[in-house]
Image: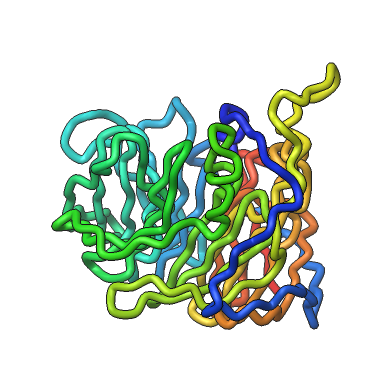
Amino acid sequence: MHLVKIMILSVMSGCILLVSCSMNPRVEKTFPVVDKVEASYHRIEEILGIVNIIKLNDYIVLQNGSEGVADFFFVYSCPEMEFLYSFAKKGRGPEEYMLPSVTKNTGGNTLGFRDHATDKIAFYELTDSTAVLRHSLSMKSPDMDRFFWEINMVDDSVALVKHQGYKRGATELWNIYGMEMLDSVPNTFKHLPRKLGREYYTIFDDYAISSHDGRFVIGYYMIDRMEFGHIVGNRIEKTGYCGSESCPKFHLYGDDTEEEFSIDRNIIYYENLYAGDEYVYGLYSGKRLDDTEKEHSSMIEVYTWDGEPVRLLELDVPAAYFAVAEEAKTVYAVNPEVSEEDILIFRF
């Protein structure tokens, strides 16, 4: 979310959403079950400054954000949370990385990530004792003004990505070995660039993507909206949505007061997503950006893959990053603002 602060924001209010007639809307978000869940704390001794948590079949992986620790990823058994080992050293040598971003939906006990500093994408097979590099290749955008974000593997060679820069973005499907784009879907709020012209930046309709088994969900950061879809025959198909049909009234860049920065007054909705086998989980904030950066989100919305609201989890401790063990009905989360040394475990 720090990217928000360095982008110039300006948007017209009252914008009308252009919705594809193939999408099935579900505007109301009424949850039949509301659970208040309490966190238990599991102390982590190995690192400070956790910036991501990833759930694989048999392991929990924490991504290190501390400058003083040599490795990026720390592997723990699940559900025991016993520390096993760390890997992926910082640097520019073989099997060293500078700015890794985790690739989702890699399957089994495979951890994939793209190094934004070097354009390398690597896949490691995790065992109880070591992480073995399965393969590595270059995934460099052919567009100098855009970058690959929110990478989700559809199968061993095809990735669903957000291909986005400051001024232009799209959801795309890529064969990562031949670096061939298979399909591209423009941002849903596609009227914004036309209406705003030079004032448009993709932060207005920025989003997170999470996928599982050929299905995907999109959650917008600054619009109260989730979208659902699937990949069929190397084509991206959005099938439905829930939440808002229109843009909120954004606070404009430059409309500052002596007391506060204008961008900070905008509301953040979905901070993170998790695509499970049975359900979709959205980490919902509903707070101003300046509050979100301090407190993060205290609610997890649960939906079916058809967009039907199922359950609302009200967390007694806010979370910044999370993963779900569905069969165990357990949420594993971290929040550096609450504690840099603990994993938050919620059972529902």
As drawn, 330 above or below 45: below
Nearer the observer, 2 or 262: 262
Choose top left, top right, bottom left or bottom right for residue 89.
top left
Q: Quadrant of the N terminus?
A: top right
In front: 211, or 202?
202
Query: Residue drawn at (38%, 70%), measured in percent from left and top?
Result: 236
Residue located at (66% from left, 73% from top): 302
Residue 284 image point, x, y percent: 70, 58
Horizontal arrangement in the rendering, residue 175 relative to residue 305 (left or right): left
Identity of the residue drawn at 16% across and 36% down: 94
Residue 29 appears in view: yes
**Can you see residue 338?**
no
Task: Find residue 39 and report its image quarter.
Answer: bottom right
Colouring used for the render: rainbow
Q: Position of residue 97 (x, y in %)?
A: 29, 36
Horizontally, residue 180 falls left or right of residue 232, namely: left
Give the vertical position of 87 relative to 81 (above or below). Answer: above
Picture residue at 33% right of the left edge, 69% below the top? 154
Instruction: Single out the residue that lies furthest toward the top.
Output: 258
Q: Quadrant of the C terminus?
A: bottom right
| Residue 214 located left or right of residue 8 | left
Image location of residue 53, percent across then percent down: 50, 53
Q: Quadrant of residue 174?
A: bottom left
Relative to 45, is 311 above or below? below
* Along the viewing direction, whichever of 317 and 18 lies nearer the viewer: 18
**Image spot of residue 207 (x, y percent):** 55, 53
